[in-house]
Image (cartoon, rainbow, N blue to C red):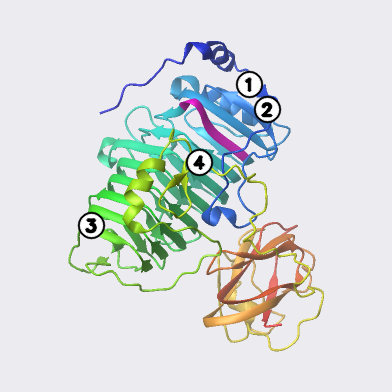
């Protein structure tokens, strides 16, 4: 049953609403940034600052939001969009421009970067209208409500997802939001918070997800394993049937969340996924952790959780619940610091902090809600290692010692016909791997932790100079060890890992990587 839509704005905003409805975006004299700073995996890969440092505009319609995106100098010009009022189908139209790609039936953040959308004043409600993030990076969404988004029935929006991310999305921080539906798939709703098709470095914090059949997923199918490095903390999941979240491949960290009335299943780790589950409070729920509805198992590491009136089903061919006495089945390390509240106080802390219009209060690990940290989120995270630290080994030094890649394993995100991942660690410069396009990633992996401090990327004869921008990633933690452009020798601080990834993010043609050599020093 749909809730009535709030259509009235305060009288004091009448002039502003008329301006926005007419397509006018009102600029503010001072740039604004989202309160506090990103946490969790959103702090990695360069960090997530949204529109910090750019222009600030006010919008009271969806059309005005799109106009703000389209009015920038280019698709990466930073901008903070302050939203107040109800955004719905009636006031959201497609807007065209060189710096945007929008649609009438959703708030479309497509092929853009450096955007903050933040609710202000009396609040921002996206009513039956989802937020779609596609082929974009460095996005902050804060202090908004998204409700009753449908994939069937009328009206429909965003495939039924309240917030949906897909296709090469990087660095998204969603904070102090309320995401809610009024039923499950049979009533026309889908997920509240979905990530698929190569979405990475995401944090969902201090948010409320409720009254939905599906909380959210990471990966659209058992083969969509290119997603991950996602943090969920201090969120309330309430009256959710399943997917809190569903994790297919990749790594996710869930800490200090309050799970209440998970009716069928909760954290569903499958298809090789790893879930780090710390200090959460599970209450009045069923099968809150495990592998469900598949025979492709995932794993989990558990610590400090409280299970209050949780029931567990019997193990079966397609069900592997973690309880009734959950034990760790893997180990997961994360590359960031975090303040962990004791699980016993999580219900009270989350009640005071999670959701839109809660004053953006946060926790510092003391079980007492605090006002948001005014620290400028554009400041670098002091816990992040600097890949260009002058104390690092000189990357121009020739490699020395044993090439650790010979005899190791290899895999990747894509490969061109006739090429093989294994060709990058066979010691033969006559064979090579190519991505199925101009970008992609290839990894070298070992069965146990191996210390690596330098790699050498050798391009096949005739393709020298094709590799453009790249990142070197510790696959186990998601930490970016180095970034730059061009193949060759790349050095970084020594790190013990089981899998190292060379990700090509830009190229002048189809790269051909003959060897991905790894060295301890």
Of circles 4 and 3, the one toward us is: 4
Q: Is residue 486 magenta?
A: no
Badge 2 marks a residue whose secondary structure is loop
Quick one: label 4 or label 3, which is nearer the N terminus? 3
Quick one: label 2 or label 1, which is nearer the N terminus? 1
Local crowd at mark 2 within 10 Å, few (<14), some, or many (≥20)?
Answer: some
Q: Residue at x 41, y 58 (%)?
A: 254
Asked if one can make out residue 127 in the rendered structure from this viewpoint, the answer is yes
Quick one: label 2 or label 3, which is nearer the N terminus? 2
* Callouts 2 and 4 close, C-beta under 8 Å: no
Q: Please, is residue 19 above or below residue 127 in the view?
A: above
Q: Of the numbered discs in the image, which one, if any, rests on residue 308?
A: 3
Whole-Å distance between the Cαs marked 4 and 1?
30 Å
Which residue is identified by label 2? Answer: 71
Which residue is identified by label 1? Answer: 25
The quarter of the displayed image where residue 77 is located: top right
Left or right: residue 65 compared with residue 453 = left
Whole-Å distance between the Cαs marked 4 and 3?
29 Å
Q: Percent position (x, y) of residue 308?
A: 23, 57
The quadrant the N terminus occupies is top left
Whole-Å distance between the Cαs marked 2 and 1?
9 Å
Of circles 3 and 1, the one toward us is: 3
Left or right: residue 57 compared with residue 469 = left
Which residue is identified by label 4? Answer: 371
Quick one: label 4 or label 1, which is nearer the N terminus? 1
Q: Percent position (x, y) of residue 230?
A: 48, 56
* Range drawn in magenta: 115-123
Q: Residue at x 81, y 78 (%)?
A: 397
The quarter of the displayed image where residue 441 is located: bottom right
Q: Please, is residue 288 above or below residue 158 in the view?
A: below
* Callouts 2 and 1 close, C-beta under 8 Å: yes
Left or right: residue 479 compared with residue 521 = left
């Amino acid at each position: 049953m749909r809730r009535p839509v709030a259509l009235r704005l305060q009288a004091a905003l009448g002039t502003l609403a008329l301006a926005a409805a007419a397509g006018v975006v009102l600029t503010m004299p001072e740039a604004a940034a989202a309160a506090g700073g990103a946490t969790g995996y959103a702090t990695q890969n360069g960090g997530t600052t949204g529109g910090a440092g750019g222009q600030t505009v006010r919008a009271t319609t969806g059309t005005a939001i799109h106009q703000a995106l389209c009015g920038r100098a280019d698709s990466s010009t930073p901008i903070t969009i302050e939203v107040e009022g109800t955004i719905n189908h009636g006031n959201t139209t497609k807007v065209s421009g060189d710096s945007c790609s929008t649609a009438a039936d959703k708030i479309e953040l497509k092929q853009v970067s450096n955007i903050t959308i933040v609710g202000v004043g009396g609040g921002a409600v996206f009513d039956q209208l989802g937020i779609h993030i596609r082929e974009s990076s460095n996005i902050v969404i804060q202090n908004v409500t998204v409700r009753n988004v449908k994939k069937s029935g009328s009206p429909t929006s965003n495939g039924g997802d309240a917030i949906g991310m897909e296709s090469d999305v990087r660095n998204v921080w969603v904070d102090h939001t309320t995401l809610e539906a009024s039923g499950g798939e049979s009533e026309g709703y889908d997920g509240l918070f979905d990530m698929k098709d190569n979405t990475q470095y995401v944090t969902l914090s201090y948010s409320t997800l409720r009254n939905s059949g599906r909380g959210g997923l990471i990966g659209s199918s058992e083969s969509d394993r290119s997603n991950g490095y996602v943090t969920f903390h201090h969120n309330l999941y309430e009256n959710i049937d399943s997917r809190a979240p569903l994790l297919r491949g990749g790594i996710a960290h869930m800490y200090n969340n309050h799970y209440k009335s998970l009716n069928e299943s909760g954290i569903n780790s499958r298809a090789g996924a790893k879930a780090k589950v710390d200090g959460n409070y599970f209450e009045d729920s069923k099968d809150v952790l495990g592998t469900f509805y598949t025979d492709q198992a995932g794993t989990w590491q558990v610590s400090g959780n409280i299970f209050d009136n949780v029931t567990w089903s019997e193990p079966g061919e397609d069900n592997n619940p973690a309880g009734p006495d959950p034990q760790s089945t893997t180990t997961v390390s994360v590359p960031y610091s975090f303040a962990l509240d004791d699980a016993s106080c999580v219900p009270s802390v989350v009640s005071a902090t999670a959701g839109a219009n809660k004053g953006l209060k946060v926790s510092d690990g003391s079980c007492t809600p605090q006002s948001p940290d005014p620290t400028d989120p554009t400041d670098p995270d002091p816990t992040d290692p600097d890949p260009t630290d002058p104390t690092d080994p000189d990357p121009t030094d020739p490699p020395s010692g044993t090439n650790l890649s010979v005899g190791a394993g290899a895999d990747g995100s894509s490969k061109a016909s006739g090429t093989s991942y294994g060709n990058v660690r066979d010691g033969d410069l006559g064979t090579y791997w190519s991505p199925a396009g101009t970008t992609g990633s290839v990894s070298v992996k070992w069965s146990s932790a191996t210390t690596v401090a330098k790699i050498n990327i050798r391009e096949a004869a005739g393709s020298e100079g094709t590799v453009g921008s790249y990142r070197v990633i510790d696959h186990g933690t998601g930490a970016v060890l180095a970034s730059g452009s061009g193949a060759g020798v790349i050095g970084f601080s020594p790190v013990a890992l089981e899998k190292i990834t060379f990700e090509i993010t830009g190229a002048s043609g189809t790269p051909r990587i003959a060897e991905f050599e790894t060295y301890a020093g």
